[in-house]
Image (tube, helix red, strand yellow):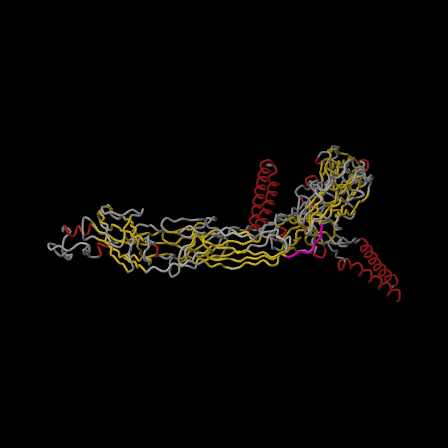
């Protein structure tokens, strides 16, 4: 009984263990990274971009599987790391550069490899980024379309295959154009690697139509080594199973069938006028003089979704404000509108249109009516004006009042309408003058205009108190012809000799043809009693004092003295002088009452200790030619003794002669030192000395206060390797000194590091050989590549390219490559190394090269079935579902068989026992 229970328990445990793989051994994603890494977001300042690895294989990877590295590409090869998170916010410093994203699996994740993606060049705004993305997509689509067309023409015999490839490219283009906010770049593929040729793989079921069961078993037994026998794979395309066999996945992960997006944005604007249902600026009716017509305003609003850039406009009959700044979506701007001056009488109704650089137009209406000027003769009755100088005649009949009933044939009315004069002012008010004036101090102008319909012969008025002159100052005379609409200006001034009193006269300008046609102006002036002449000048300040000067003083600041004529007569000043002061030039010598003039007062330099005083006389030249004093400005100086100060300085205080190599033939060039006496007493310089430096002669040894002298210093020849520093002292007889620190370094000669080309090597190639499904990885190691602190003349070797059948180049480290060969045979891997020499700043090629080779064997491998990935175009294909579980189930199958055997043994045992 116990034995049976024991067997039952054992069988139960084994059955449970056999079921464990299906429940708990679901494996996490593992293997080498493949597929496509994307950067999500526009490459514009202020935008946050992020890593998008939805297309990365194997499936099921998460944020916890990777470390992130964002870098700024500052050159062809230079990268500066700027972030380590999944997301990164673009800054102003990134403007103009491309950004690179690298993702690397964390340790212990079961994943290997690295994927890289790059953005487009970073621009300032999202609008610019969108435009750049669309331009990049347009160029890509054109290139792909041209490539597809060429393939279609050259491969008409394989129409079905070409159609599938073209459809894949079109799907990719649709995906790229749809997502204008996601910039994506595939992981950077090594330029030396190509895809497997699927056409060379056999089908496991023997059918050429079933492309889902392709294998990499090569059946061609030819010994040639052409391109069809060797395929170079990328790290992403190589997949190695547990037995070390290589499988490839040729799925085009970039092809997606997505709907296109219309990127065209709306550009639209409207115009509106306040208090107007329609956009109309109605200025109404105005006279030809438009000075009083006020501007009106029109509001322009951008109702589209894009910014508008307006062009300048210039309408014919109206002036408008240009819109100089871009108008963003939803914004408005008010522009003024005004009729142009000089418009003739008539009606004006214009449609004014603003145009934008984007092709948008926005219009509004502007209209005005201009009336002509009416003649005074049409609006007012003309009445004759009597000339005050003419006595009325007994035979003169009173003028008749114009009668509206008279016809146009009346000769009297016709003559009155034909001639008319107008004057621009009615009164001329002259400023008061004093009695006994010798010349009028003011001249006023009047303008007479012929406002009639015919020419007028002008009659000039005569006056007892005023002169009527032409513009050039000559006396005006009657008889000047004044054409219709013409004007003439006259100058009026009081006559000389008028005595005290008020004077007024009416000046009547008339027509010689019609005495009734006149224009008049009243001139007035008052002559005052002459005042008593007063000659007086006031000085400010009246005294100037300098009482804080020390012997050896520099020139002090000047003092400005202002002279004002406070009298009522004009004075002619004489230039003042001083003994202990320098007197500046008068700003003016003729001063009318109330006018002012200035001059400066500055102490002379070089005065010794003591008190000094000047009385600076301000004089004029009188009518007799004699000079008389008007006022006096007292100026004083006090100079005191000073304590003697000894102070010496050198410039520069330090000299660095740099460094040179031991055994130098010529010492460095001498450098100059300037010594300055900064005290207030003379000093005498003594020549300095030095142990390892040569000292030149002084340019001068006696220095007055403020004076300088120079001398030169240079290192001695033949100094041995070492550092030489000295403090060279410049001394004086007055026991004052200054020091200059000098430095010079002699370096030992460095021997250049010359790498031996024999040290160039190829590592990683196994001499035991590979199979047609092996992934072959190797590394090229250049001699001297470990020289991290190169000096001028150092030599190293850098891997340049490698070749098995095809030649492939490296652009930068690491100098590693992987490949696979699908045909058995013996092959040779050749690596070429460039010889480089360091020029003191960078490594540069010398033009010499070294070559290293290694041989290896490829044997035929057993057929391995590759599990294809479903095609994105929805083509039907039979394939097994991948679970991601790579657990070896053989032990569990054995346990299950043993459990079944135990059950069968128990059953047989029971039957026998019965």
How far across and how far down the image is residue 784, in percent?
Answer: 79, 40
How far across and how far down the image is residue 598, in percent?
Answer: 49, 54
Query: Magenta includes 117?
Result: no
Query: In this figure, what is the number of numbered marks?
Result: 0
Which residue occupies the extreme bottom position in the image? 1
From this view, report whether residue 300 is shown above or below residue 721. Answer: below
Residue 789: image quadrant is top right
Per the picture, the main secondary structure of the magenta-coloured stretch is loop
Can residue 778 be seen here?
no
How far across and how far down the image is residue 709, in percent?
Answer: 69, 44
How far across and how far down the image is residue 766, in percent?
Answer: 81, 40
Give the quadrant of the C terminus.
bottom right
Identify the magenta region. Answer: 640-648
Give the quadrant of the N terminus.
bottom right
Please state which of residues 642 and 650 is positioned toward the viewer in this rendering: 642
User: Residue 827 vs residue 209: left or right?
Assistant: right
Please state which of residues 191 and 332 is positioned toward the viewer in this rendering: 332
Can residue 504 be seen here?
yes
Query: Magenta includes 647?
Result: yes
User: Residue 238 vs residue 4: left or right?
Assistant: left
User: Residue 126 vs residue 318: left or right?
Assistant: right
Please state which of residues 164 and 410 is positioned toward the viewer in this rendering: 410
From this view, report whether residue 358 is shown above or below residue 839. Answer: below
From this view, report whether residue 701 is shown above or below residue 320. Answer: above
Please state which of residues 386 and 344 is positioned toward the viewer in this rendering: 386
Residue at point 61%, 45% (across, down): 168
């Amino acid at each position: 009984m116990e034995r049976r229970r024991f067997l039952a328990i054992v069988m139960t445990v084994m059955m449970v263990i056999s079921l464990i793989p299906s429940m708990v051994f679901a494996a996490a994603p593992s293997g080498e990274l493949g597929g496509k890494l994307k950067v999500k977001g526009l490459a514009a300042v202020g935008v946050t971009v992020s890593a998008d690895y939805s297309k990365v294989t194997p499936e099921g990877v998460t944020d916890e599987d990777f470390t992130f590295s964002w870098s700024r590409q500052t050159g062809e090869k230079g990268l500066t790391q700027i972030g380590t998170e999944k997301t990164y916010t673009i800054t102003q410093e990134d403007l103009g550069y491309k950004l690179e994203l690298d993702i690397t699996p964390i340790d212990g994740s079961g994943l290997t490899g690295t994927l890289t993606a790059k953005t487009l060049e970073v621009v300032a705004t999202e609008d610019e980024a969108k435009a750049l993305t669309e331009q990049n997509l347009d160029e890509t689509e054109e290139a792909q379309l041209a490539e597809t067309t060429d393939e279609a023409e050259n491969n008409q015999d394989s129409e079905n295959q070409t159609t599938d490839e073209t459809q894949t490219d079109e799907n990719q283009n649709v995906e790229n154009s749809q997502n204008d906010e996601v910039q994506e770049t595939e992981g950077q593929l090594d330029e030396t690697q190509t895809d497997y040729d699927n056409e060379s793989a056999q089908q496991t079921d023997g059918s050429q139509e079933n492309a889902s069961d392709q294998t990499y078993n090569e059946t061609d037994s030819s010994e040639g080594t052409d391109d069809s026998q060797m395929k170079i794979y990328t790290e992403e395309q190589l997949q190695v199973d547990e037995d070390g066999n290589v499988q490839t996945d040729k799925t085009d992960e970039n092809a997606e069938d997505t709907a296109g997006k219309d990127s065209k944005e709306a550009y639209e604007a409207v115009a509106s006028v306040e208090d107007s249902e329609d956009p109309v600026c109605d200025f109404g009716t105005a006279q030809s003089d438009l000075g009083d017509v006020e501007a009106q305003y029109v509001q322009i609003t951008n109702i589209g979704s894009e910014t508008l850039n307006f062009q300048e406009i210039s309408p014919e009959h109206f002036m408008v404000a240009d819109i100089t700044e871009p108008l963003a979506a939803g914004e408005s701007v008010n522009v003024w509108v005004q009729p142009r001056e000089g418009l003739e009488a008539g009606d004006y109704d214009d449609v004014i249109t603003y145009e934008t650089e984007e092709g948008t137009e926005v219009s509004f209406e502007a209209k005005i009516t201009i009336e002509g000027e009416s003649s005074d003769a049409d609006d007012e009755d003309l009445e004759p004006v009597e000339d005050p100088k003419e006595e009325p005649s007994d035979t003169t009949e009173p003028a008749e009042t114009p009668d509206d009933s008279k016809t146009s044939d009346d000769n009297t009315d016709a003559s009155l309408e034909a001639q008319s004069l107008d004057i621009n002012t009615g009164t001329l008010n002259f400023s008061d003058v004093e009695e006994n004036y010798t010349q009028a101090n003011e001249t006023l102008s009047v303008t007479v205009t012929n406002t009639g319909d015919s020419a007028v012969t002008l009659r000039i008025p005569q006056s007892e108190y005023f002169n009527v002159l032409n513009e050039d100052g000559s006396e005006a005379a009657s008889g000047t012809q004044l054409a219709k609409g013409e004007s003439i200006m006259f100058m009026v001034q009081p006559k000389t000799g008028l005595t005290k009193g008020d004077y007024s006269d009416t000046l009547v300008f008339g027509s010689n043809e019609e005495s009734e046609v006149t224009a008049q102006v009243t001139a007035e002036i008052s002559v005052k009693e002459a005042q008593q002449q007063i000659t007086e000048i006031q000085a400010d300040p009246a005294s100037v004092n300098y009482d804080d000067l020390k012997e050896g003083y520099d020139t002090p600041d000047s003092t400005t003295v202002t002279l004002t004529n406070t009298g009522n007569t004009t004075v002619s000043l004489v230039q003042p002088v001083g003994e202990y002061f320098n007197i500046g030039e008068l700003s003016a010598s003729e001063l009318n009452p109330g006018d002012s003039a200035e001059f400066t007062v500055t102490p002379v330099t070089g005065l010794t200790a003591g008190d000094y005083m000047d009385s600076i006389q301000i004089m004029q030249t009188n009518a007799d030619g004699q000079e008389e004093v008007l006022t006096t400005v007292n100026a004083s100086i006090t100079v005191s003794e000073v304590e003697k100060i000894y102070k010496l300085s050198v410039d520069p205080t330090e000299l660095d002669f740099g460094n040179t190599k031991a055994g130098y033939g010529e010492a460095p060039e001498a450098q100059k030192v300037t010594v300055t006496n900064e005290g207030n007493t003379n000093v005498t310089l003594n020549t300095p000395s030095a142990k390892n430096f040569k000292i030149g002669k002084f340019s001068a040894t006696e220095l007055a206060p403020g004076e300088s002298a120079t001398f030169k210093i240079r290192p001695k020849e033949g100094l041995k390797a070492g550092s030489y520093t000295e403090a060279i002292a410049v001394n004086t007889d007055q026991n004052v000194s200054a020091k200059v620190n000098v430095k010079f370094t002699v370096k030992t000669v460095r021997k250049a590091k010359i790498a031996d080309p024999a040290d160039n090597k190829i590592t990683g190639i196994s001499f035991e050989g590979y199979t047609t499904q092996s992934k072959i990885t190797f590394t090229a190691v250049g001699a001297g590549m470990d020289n991290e602190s190169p000096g001028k003349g150092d030599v190293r070797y850098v891997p340049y390219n490698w070749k098995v059948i095809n030649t492939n180049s490296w652009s930068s480290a690491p100098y590693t490559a992987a490949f696979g060969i699908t045909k058995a045979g013996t092959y040779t891997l050749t690596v070429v190394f460039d010889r480089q020499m360091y020029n003191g700043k960078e490594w540069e090629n010398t033009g010499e090269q070294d070559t290293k080779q290694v041989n290896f064997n490829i044997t035929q491998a057993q057929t391995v079935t590759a599990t294809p990935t479903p095609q994105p175009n929805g083509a039907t294909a039979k394939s097994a579902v991948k679970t991601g579980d790579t657990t070896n189930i053989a032990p569990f199958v054995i346990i299950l068989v043993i459990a079944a055997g135990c059950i069968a043994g128990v059953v047989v045992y029971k039957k026998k026992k019965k």
